[in-house]
Image (cartoon, rainbow, N blue to C red):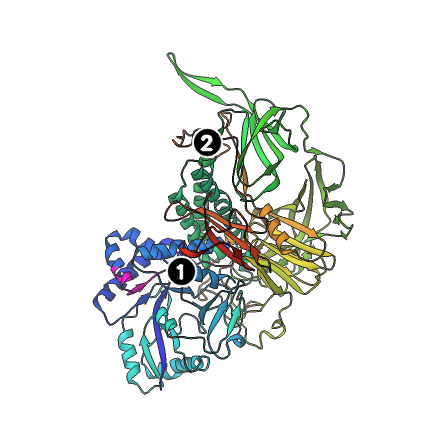
Amino acid sequence: MKKKVYVVPHSHWDREWYFSIEDSNTLLSENMEFLMGYLSAHAEFPTYCFDGQYSLIDEFTKYAPEKRDELKELIATNRIQVGPWYTQCDTLLIQTESIIRNLLLGQQGAKRYGKSMSVGYLPDIFGQNAYLPAIFNGFGLQSCVLQRGIYNEQLAKDLTFDWVSPNGEKILTNNLFYGYGPGKFLNVDQKYVHETLLPILNRLSEKTAPGNPILLPAGGDQVLVRTMFPQTVDDLNDMDLPYEFVLSDYESFMAATKNITETELIGELLASQKSRIHHTIRSQRVDIKLLNSKVEEKIYKQLEPLGVLHSQLGGKYPQTWINTALTLLFDAHAHDSIGGCNSDETNQTIINRLHKAERIIDDYINILKKQIARAITQSNGTVVVFNLLPKAIKKLLNVVVFTHEAQVSLESRTGEKLPQSMINQSYLSGGKQVKVTADGEQEVELPGYYRSEIAVEVTFAGFGYQQLQIVECPEIDCLLDIKTTEIENEFYRISLTSGKLNLVRKADGQTKVDWLKFENTTDGGDSYDYSPSENGQLTNNDSFELVETKQADMLSQLKVVTTVAAAPDLAHATQLTEKITIETLIELRHGSDIIQVTHTVLNEVKDHRVRVVFAGENADGFSFGDQGYSLQQRAINNPHLANWKDEGFAEAPQPIFPLERFVSVNEVQGNVTLLTKGLKEYEATAESLALTLYRSVGLLGRDNLAWRPGRASGINNKIVETPDAQMQGELIFDYGYRWHEGTIDIEDSYRAAERFATSQISYQVQTLNSFEERVDRFELPQPENMKELPKIKNLLTIQENLFFAAFKQAEEGKQSILRVFNPTVQSIAIQAPLRNQQLITLAEKQLDNTFVELKSKDFASIYVDF
């Protein structure tokens, strides 16, 4: 009996890369129109997969609106398959919430055109997020097809397996062993059939269980439909071959496939044996990663929950504008785009796109805060502080106020003086106002005023807001210079001694001498991968020198500076003639066990990588990076690393890993957690934990790297220089460091990550300064149903052992949706007010059951009734 081969014609459509989005869209217009015309005229060509991303439909119909109805007919009748993605995102460089929203908008968009593909399609992204099986299940997807991240030994018997999320959910999955293009040039030429096609099919047959068909993807990057395929398949079937060929699609193939061998793969897939993973792409064009993370935090941790609050108080939820910002964000999340492995022109477009999304988000944060605050008070002597985390929390907030007087402080609404310190204060000119009089226009000098930034400790009962009073106070504590080389709070003491930074943990007196240092190495790689240079040298920083120390009741700061010797570029790798200057600000805050660190780097050299390295002896041989809704345990030594070339790996399996928000390690003297906002790459060793700050490279592709033999990734027949990727100029990096006794406490670590997020914001009703907030200077109407609000409001408080993922309004209807998760190894019984609330899917469809328990490493989406 002949083995059945499903030939799946498709286009893999990179939205942008070494070419621009405009290049892509003009080509898309021509290709899509040709495809539509051909399919409409040729019923023998059953279906065509257009890369599983709906954004291409959005782009095409933008320029060809007259084709919309014809395209709808082709999609609804399964002739063209699109979705479930909006864009095919890199699932390891963005927040898990972005993966969910990408699928939500992609699937809904595709269904508006008649049908969304029911396969979780991952043909080319650089490694797979551990929670994709559960996320795909949440959208009702039936199966998954993916390429990268799997060891050969894991699928020795069959390329079909059950992929299992950390929470136990699974999805039937097939591995594209030869990638997405082995059938791209399918034809009946005897030489091709016997020297190319049959060897491929025979190898695939060996790796396919007897009862399962073979998948032969027949497409490639930006390819035009192969109009000869129906005849080619017929001709192949007329030949005396041991295979029966069917021109089909991924859905049909997966429907005919079973997990006969009962193989399961659990969690993230990061193997680089068969396909390149590009482990160090996570530090390429770090400016894009940092900006993306900033935008994600603003939309998921601020604007969306603020919109929920606003709508519950009588206003509106800005759904259309939020989705506009999201689609801009998702356009930056395609695997090449967020990877930064693009031309300089394309990377600049990505940055502009992210800035555009950020401006929309900032505008609506400003508008919603202002409308709520105006409904609470008409007085200039008040500030409204918002807690957009639906949990009780006490936190030191930075609040900006504008006053005529310099001597100001903040009190609670009841007149209680709050713990606070003045961080900085500046006097600003009032400027001039033009007044129209009977004698013409006259300029009037306005009185000056003070801008004060105050760190104030505020206690919130839960999701909501409260009003603070601005009062005159001559005795406010201020952050002032002090003559010392040491700072401390309840948890730590940090000192500069003999040019080294030393850290003391007060709980038990443990000390880290030479706590952190910088490491610089010459980078002989490209936009995809770091590569150690044959002639390059590893250098560490010189002694730290004190810049200043500042102290106040609520916080203290230590600022130091150092330099690192470096070669000017790859061509002069042996000549350490240059210096990289790094200024470091370390801040300790009252009540916080997170040390806040800011590095300002002046980068004037090329072709190198800079990491910050923290001393600490690893206790168990693992690191624990957060991803999705749990920690991923990763060995600090990969057993394949010693013989990776002999084993035929596509690239060296370096134990350099991605993180979503934080990484933790168990050390001999406790446990350490690094909390980041956009820094995405770390390496844990037996002696240290290294966080990559940035890579500086100048080429899109380079052949034969030390850790990646063979051709350049991407295009290998053209050199694309990327001078902007050398990251010249000033670079700023922020993160948090936490050092506790004992081993990692998962719940405690995630609680620290919640505190580290910016979920608390403020707004002052004032007329002195109209430029602090983005659109404050313009007139703004007040919602009719939002006129008089109480001075304090708490709408929701959830239990401490549940963790917040998202708070939004449903895409259809007015219900508020809360997404929470449980990263621990124990199930959680749900308490009021969430107990018995209605559970829904990620696709926002109602389930039959209500919320009573959350399993280990699981998540849930619920409708919330306030």
Query: In the visual, does 667 lie left or right of 158?
Result: right
Q: What stretch is highlighted in magenta?
A: 73-93
Main secondary structure along the magenta-highlighted residues: loop
User: Which quadrant holds the N terminus?
Assistant: bottom left
**Is residue 564 something that shows in the picture?**
yes
Q: Measuring 54% from the left and 38% from the top, which residue is drawn there?
A: 761
Q: Which of marks 1 and 2 is nearer the N terminus?
A: 1
Classify residue 199 by image quadrant.
bottom left
Q: How far apart are marks 1 and 2 (CA)?
A: 39 Å
x, y percentage for residue 324?
39, 46
Label 2 Cα neighbours within 10 Å, binned few <14 / some 14-19 / many ≥20: some
Q: Is residue 790 above or below residue 753?
A: above
Which residue does the numbered mark 1 point to in the structure image?
A: 14
Residue at numbered disc 2: 776
Q: Residue furthest top?
A: 439
Residue 203 point in image, percent of width and height: 44, 81
Residue 573 can be seen in this image: no
Q: x and y percent of residue 531 in the render? A: 58, 63
Tag 1: amino acid: Asp
Q: Which residue is at the front of the view, 12 or 374? A: 374
Residue 89, magenta (yes or no): yes
- The amino acid marked with disc number 2 is Asp
- Give how far across and how far down residue 500 sits, in percent: 75, 49
Q: Is residue 265 magenta?
A: no
Relative to 415, does residue 44 appear above or below in the rendering? Answer: below
Q: Residue 533 vs residue 216: left or right?
A: right
Furthest residue toward left: 41
